[in-house]
Image (cartoon, rainbow, N blue to C red):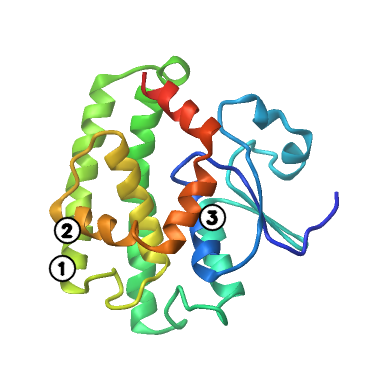
Amino acid sequence: MTRETTPVVWGVGTARTIRAHWALCELGVDYKTHEIIPRTETMNDPEFLKRSERGKVPILEHGDLVLGESGAIVFYLADQFRDQIALTPELSSIERAHFDEICFFTMMELDGPLYIIRRHQGLGEIYGASDTAVNAAREYYVRQAQVVEGWLSEAGPFLMGEAFSAADIFVGSCSSWAQFIGIELPEGLAQHLAIVSERDGFKQAFATNFPPAAMAELARNLE
């Protein structure tokens, strides 16, 4: 398998894949993309399967590194290209501890219920349709989003204050996902999404992450 020195993102079309694209765009790093879209024939690409034994996106390929999980990818990119822009606070600082709290909370308490909704609504034919699970996950998401809204009210306009960080990528990607499936965001998160979605990095990442084929697949899952 040929190792790429230019970063390569395998995967488009989801709130999780956009995190890798968004981080790279914010960092100003040139990279390559393979349009692997979940639940489509593109997932059978032999080159993709060589890199993802789990058959999951996103995958980041960079030199000898092949890495899955969107959170790990964003953290790696932030560290690797820190000389471009600092997307994370300094290690061992109080700010870094709070940053880590926000990121891990977001991945567990916001991303988690959103994926429950995707499984039992958008992918009901696979995981079993369940209005009970979907409604409970929606209510849970809103309650936990209010926690993040509280953090924003103390920091603002971004989660770490005046500077945009990877925490905004995690929260913004979840807010965009929630809004897309019809969840009314708390006012603070709606304002935060409006701010981050105007960033050039987000616009560039969105265009790459949601090509026409990916948008068509999203629409099909909402039918």
Residue 188's tag is 2
Q: Which residue is mark 1?
A: 153
Q: Residues within 10 Å of mark 1 (few under 14, many from 20)?
A: some
Name the image quarter holding the C terminus. Answer: top left
Looking at marks 2 and 3 on the same chain, the residue that comes earlier in the sequence is marked by: 3
Camera sees residue 110: no
- Using the image, determine if residue 185 lies above or below residue 97: above
Residue furthest to the right in view is 1
Q: Is residue 35 left or right of residue 181?
A: right
Q: Position of residue 196 (x, y in %)?
A: 33, 61
Q: CA distance from mark 1 to mark 2?
A: 7 Å
- Using the image, determine if residue 121 lies above or below residue 159: above
Seen at 17% across and 47% down, the residue is 143
Q: Secondary structure at mark 2?
A: helix
Q: Amino acid at mark 2?
A: Gly
Q: Amino acid at mark 1?
A: Ser
